Every structure is written in structure tokens, then in C-alpha cells.
Image: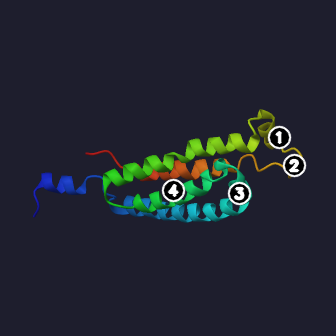
Amino acid sequence: MMPQPIRTILNRGRFEGMEGLRSRLILAALAGGMLMLFFEVRFSHRFIAVNNWYGKIPIVFALVALVACLVAMAENRRLRLISAVVLALGVPIGLFGLYQHTEGEVEALAEVVRSAEKDSSRPPALAPMGLAGLGLIGALVAWPARKS
């Protein structure tokens, strides 16, 4: 039998019980989503990424976030915290992508809300927000529980 202080130190930041299983399943699903996002963005940005540095950001982030999802499944509290911070970076990256897709014009967002005629010359305005949403979900799941 292990003394309570040692057991507490060893169990710090661990996924426990059904909550742990659920968190790992969500992180595995997010890792799969990041992999799909990588392929989709890599295909849709194939011409943009050649000429513009910012076209590479979601491609690189999707791969980094995939690794962060896998690392977040670890039992180590610090690794999960680092993974949560990395995944949370999806929010500002998604907002930057939203700015790039709309070219900084509020009218482009208003068109989406009004469901106006689709202009095929523009990239989908809200597509980068998918990256932000996946990153936020990952950060919330990966964030380690408080020490008790």
C-alpha cells in the first residue's frame, strides 16, 4: 500500500475513470479532425501557400495541433497544459484567417449572414472559424484538472 502523499503526487493531473476515457476519445476524434483539416486546407491553399506566407499557417497549425491532441492524452499534467495552450492558439489563428478570407471587409461577413448570392471568386469567409472551434474544444478538453 502506497502512502497517501505519494499517491497524490503520482495521480496529479491524470485522467481518471470514465471522464478520462471520454477526454481521450474526444482528443482522438479531434486528432482525426485535425488530420482531415490538414488535407483539406493543404488542397484548398495549394496555390495561395506558394505565394503567401500566411497561406501556410493553417496547414502547419493543423499538423502541430494533431500532435498536441496526441500529446494531451498523456498522463503528464505539464504536457497536457502545453498541449492545451497550443490548441488554444487555434482561436487567434482562426480569427486571422477570417480577416484574410474577408480581406478585412465587414461587408463580406454581412453577405454570409444575409445568405447573399455566393461569389465564387472569394474564399469561404467563415471557413477559418472551424479551425478556431476545433482548437478551442481541444484546449478545453486537454486543460488539466485542478490539483486537489
Disc 4 designates what residue?
65
| Circle nearer the N terminus (1, 2) | 1
Asked whether the beta carbons under mark 1 and mark 2 sit within 8 Å of each other, the answer is yes
Q: Tell me the kind of residue under disc 1.
A: Glu
**Residue designated by label 2:** 119
Q: Name the element at disc 3.
A: loop
Closer to us: 24 or 125: 125
Mark 1 or mark 4, earlier in chain: 4
- The answer for how far apart the CA atoms under marks 3 and 4 are is 18 Å
Which quadrant is home to the C terminus? top left
Bin the neighbour count of mark 1 within 10 Å (Cα to Cα): few under 14, some 14-19, many 20 and up.
some
Q: Which residue is mark 3?
A: 45
Q: What residue is disc 1 on?
A: 111
Residue 116, horizontal then vertical, whole percent: 87, 44
Q: Which kind of residue does numbered mark 3 sit on?
A: His
Label 4: few (<14), some or many (≥20) within 10 Å? many
Q: Amino acid at mark 2?
A: Asp
Labels 3 and 4 touching (C-beta < 8 A): no
- The CA span between labels 1 and 4 is 31 Å
